[in-house]
Amino acid sequence: MRWKEEGVPLVVCFLCILVWVVFMLFNLELLGYVFSHEGGGVNIGLLGVVVIGLAVIGGAFLMAWAAEAGQFIFSQAFALALLALLEVFPEYMFEASLAWKRCIELAAATMTGSNRLLLGAGWPLVFFIYALSCKRKSGKLARELVLDIKQSVEIFFLAVLTLYSFIIVLKGTLDIVDTVILFALYGVYVCLCYRMPAEAESGIEYIHGPAKLILRLKNSGSIIVMLVLMFLGGVVIFFSAPLFLGGIIALAISAGVSVFLTAQWLAPFLSEFPESTSAFYYATREELAPMGIGNLVSAKVNQWSLLIGTIPLVYSFSVGQLAFIPLDELQKHEILLTAAQSIYGTVALMKLRFTYLDALILFGLWFIQFIYPPIRIEVTIIYFILALVEFVYYRRENGRLFREFIKAVKG
């Protein structure tokens, strides 16, 4: 029984990766696409999309199990930060390729689209999966997801980075100064995550599956296996995610889907696939559901810092000098809408609880603007109003976030 629960999932993931390796060996020219990604499609056929898609899922699960075990070796915050960094990397590559080609309109569309998709669809889906898993277990739908107090660090930095995005909108440019500031904020965030304590060993009893197998190895053995699985999953996603993304884009374009729609919604949906896989896996388990939200919050911190900071950096290399990127009205409105959504999402988490109403609001407003993009200004205003109402209504609970953050900083 233990082997079926702990070993079989690992074997299945390794088999998916093995099939992908064989496929790549027979199509070595695809490696050229990975390293010289043009931001467009690549014709790998439906079979190739399936094989590579399964490899992405396999790699994402390997990293999810490694992070699940890693919270007892390092801290949960640091394990999730490392997980998010590796999972979001394909998105960095896609953004960098667009910035290198100086396709700033498409780069901005992808960046804002992926941000809004992660928060507007990803966070609510984690809650809905969690609620259904609770119903299956106890017969009642969960009405809220209580977060770990240690997640105050991720939420605090998400708030800081979201506020900085308004500065970008106000000045109307994206430049190398933004890169330095955003990269520095991310560095401080990772350092604080690393300093946080690991989870108590008493929590290991709630861990099952391959993560339990990793933790059965004592001392250095569990650390080595965790890092190997994290590295292997990262390598698989690094090489397979761009191909998966490119293959789907090629199929979409051949079917007549517009380039802008592909860049703003289809590409982000596919690039968010790795972190969504691990987050949804966590959401299926009541005791791990806070990690699901934490996984996506860490990914959001990555997007607001490293992802945005990458665009002016690569653009400057492309033009051969330090350069700033002027933002047109549409781009400023897109970033403002994304920032407004992020403000509401951050305020919703400040009480260290994520309720069914928060999930419904985030999903509903995202979906409305998704199917009818011209109302971005109206939706932006609604986000601001709801954020203010939520902040005032839960003002007594919100203070707990800052108290817990100060504790984490002091160590």
Image (tube, rainbow, N blue to C red):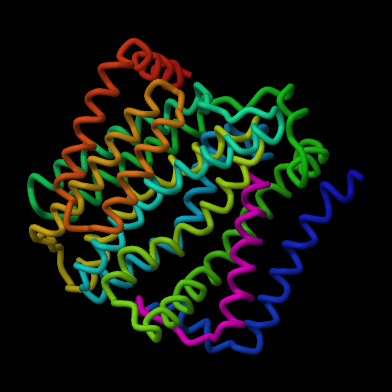
Instruction: Tell me the residue at 42%/82% (across/down).
Output: 250
* Residue 171 point in image, percent of width and height: 7, 47
Furthest residue toward right:
1
On screen, residue 58 versus residue 311, left or right, reads: right
* Residue 293 point in image, percent of width and height: 50, 38
The answer to which of 269 and 73 lies nearer the viewer is 269
Q: Quadrant of the N terminus?
A: top right
On screen, residue 307 versus residue 404, left or right, reads: left
**Figure check: 105 above or below 118:** below
Label total for image: 0
Furthest residue toward top:
396
* Main secondary structure found in the magenta portion: helix
Instruction: Tell me the residue at 67%/22% (across/down).
Output: 200
The answer to which of 198 and 248 lies nearer the viewer is 248
* Residue 312 point in image, percent of width and height: 22, 60
**Figure check: 324 above or below 278:** below
Instruction: Tell me the residue at 55%/71% (across/down).
Output: 240
Name the image quarter holding residue 71.
top right
Magenta stretch bounds: 38-67
The answer to which of 309 and 332 lies nearer the viewer is 332
Name the image quarter holding residue 197.
top right
* Residue 284 point in image, percent of width and height: 64, 41
Based on the picture, tell me whether residue 371 belongs to the magenta stretch: no
Name the image quarter holding residue 139.
top right
On screen, residue 337 versus residue 38, left or right, reads: left
**Figure check: 133 above or below 262:** above
Instruction: Tell me the residue at 19%/43% (across/down).
Output: 380
